[in-house]
Image (cartoon, helix red, strand yellow):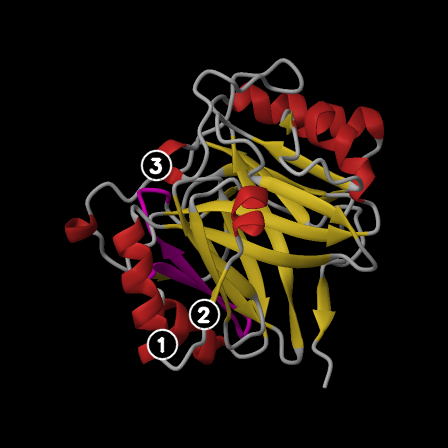
């Protein structure tokens, strides 16, 4: 399957409205207009593709879906066949669903962990439209997509097999931490677009990483969190594997935002060698003052 990037995320949250200020004022995101004019929905973006992050008011903090980009209609048709061969039923979207997602066409399916994914092609681009919500230099997107996400899955091996063999994600590396194993996958030069870790009986979105163009953007966001008393989930630090300099803040919807700069990239797939590490960070990333993740839920039934 030819997935090339993470295109968008949709999240359900009782505190969706808080994103109308949190998104632009703290993260520097731009507010996007909703194509269907839905109330109780806040759409945001970090580049010229409107609505990459959509938060809709609902009963719980829950990842509704991750949207994965394919290069063309042919690649989408091939992907549907591959899903069917793997015994996964894909649902075609209605014209209204495609319009809401700002894409030409999409299909949705559920993975073994119970997450809903959408595969799409033809995302809306409005060149020159991105204006950050506050003064900053901008985000690393383009061929690297929206950013990266880390998902908590109930069964690591089952999810690893699915993302690797069915969706075609390539392993970047692994981190082993006191019996907790994290696996990192890339689909483009971004060191990882998806990472997974297992907590038996649990499922959810741990964090979304947004990468900024300048280290000063990280410092300014950090100042803003201190000024506004926004809870930090992890202090400033530098990761061992992608070398990202970042800190983690708690979003209004429970999951964390990793706000980072300076990650290394996978420039040549043929030269990439998989390694493993024993810690997530070279320095820092100490536990902050935010409570435990609120977007990771026990799996019912
Ligand atoms: Fe991360």
Image quadrant where residue 153 sits: bottom right
Question: Mark 1 = which residue?
Answer: 84
- Residue 227 pos. (x, y %): 81, 24
Residue 193 appears in the figure: no
Q: Quick one: quadrant of the N terminus?
A: bottom left
Query: What span is in magenta?
Result: 169-190
Q: Are marks 1 and 2 in contact (CB under 8 Å)?
A: yes
- Residue 284 pos. (x, y %): 59, 43
Q: Which mark is residue 143?
A: 3
Report the front residue among 52 and 273. Answer: 52
Q: Is residue 124 left or right of residue 73?
A: right
Q: Residue furthest top?
A: 135
Q: CA distance from mark 1 to mark 2?
A: 7 Å
Q: Secondary structure at mark 2?
A: loop
Residue 298 counted in the magenta span:
no
Q: Residue at x 46, y 74 (%)?
A: 159
- Residue 201 pos. (x, y %): 66, 80
Q: CA distance from mark 3 to mark 1?
A: 28 Å
- Residue 277 pos. (x, y %): 41, 60
Secondary structure mostly seen in the magenta stretch: strand
Q: Is residue 42 left or right of residue 243?
A: right
Q: Residue furthest front?
A: 95
Within-10-Å neighbours for mark 2: few <14, some 14–19, many 20+: some
């Amino acid at each position: 399957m030819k997935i090339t990037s993470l295109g968008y995320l949709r999240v359900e949250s009782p505190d969706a409205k808080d994103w109308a200020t949190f998104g632009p004022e703290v993260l520097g995101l731009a507010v996007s207009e909703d194509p269907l004019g839905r109330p109780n929905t806040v759409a945001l973006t970090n580049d010229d593709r409107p609505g990459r992050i959509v938060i809709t008011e609902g009963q719980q903090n829950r990842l509704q879906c991750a949207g994965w980009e394919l290069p063309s209609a042919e690649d989408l048709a091939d992907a549907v066949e591959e899903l069917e061969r793997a015994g996964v039923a894909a649902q075609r979207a209605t014209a209204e669903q495609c319009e809401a997602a700002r894409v030409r066409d999409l299909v949705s399916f559920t993975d073994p962990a119970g997450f809903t994914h959408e595969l799409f092609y033809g995302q809306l681009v409005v060149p020159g439209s991105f204006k950050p919500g506050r003064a900053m230099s901008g985000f690393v997107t383009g061929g690297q997509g929206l950013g990266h996400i880390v998902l908590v899955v109930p069964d690591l091996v089952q999810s690893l097999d699915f993302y690797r063999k069915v969706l075609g994600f390539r392993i970047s590396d692994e981190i082993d931490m006191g019996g907790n194993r994290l696996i990192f996958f890339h689909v483009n030069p971004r060191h990882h677009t998806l990472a997974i870790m297992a907590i038996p009986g649990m499922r959810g979105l741990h964090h979304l990483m947004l990468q900024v163009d300048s280290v000063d953007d990280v410092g300014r966001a950090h100042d803003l969190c201190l000024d506004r008393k926004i809870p930090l989930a992890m202090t400033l630090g530098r990761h061992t594997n992608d070398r990202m300099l970042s800190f983690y803040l708690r979003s209004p919807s429970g999951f964390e935002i990793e706000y980072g700069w300076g990650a290394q990239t996978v420039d040549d797939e043929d030269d990439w060698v998989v390694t493993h590490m024993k810690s997530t960070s070279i320095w820092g990333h100490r536990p902050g003052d935010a409570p435990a993740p609120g977007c990771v839920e026990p799996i019912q039934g």
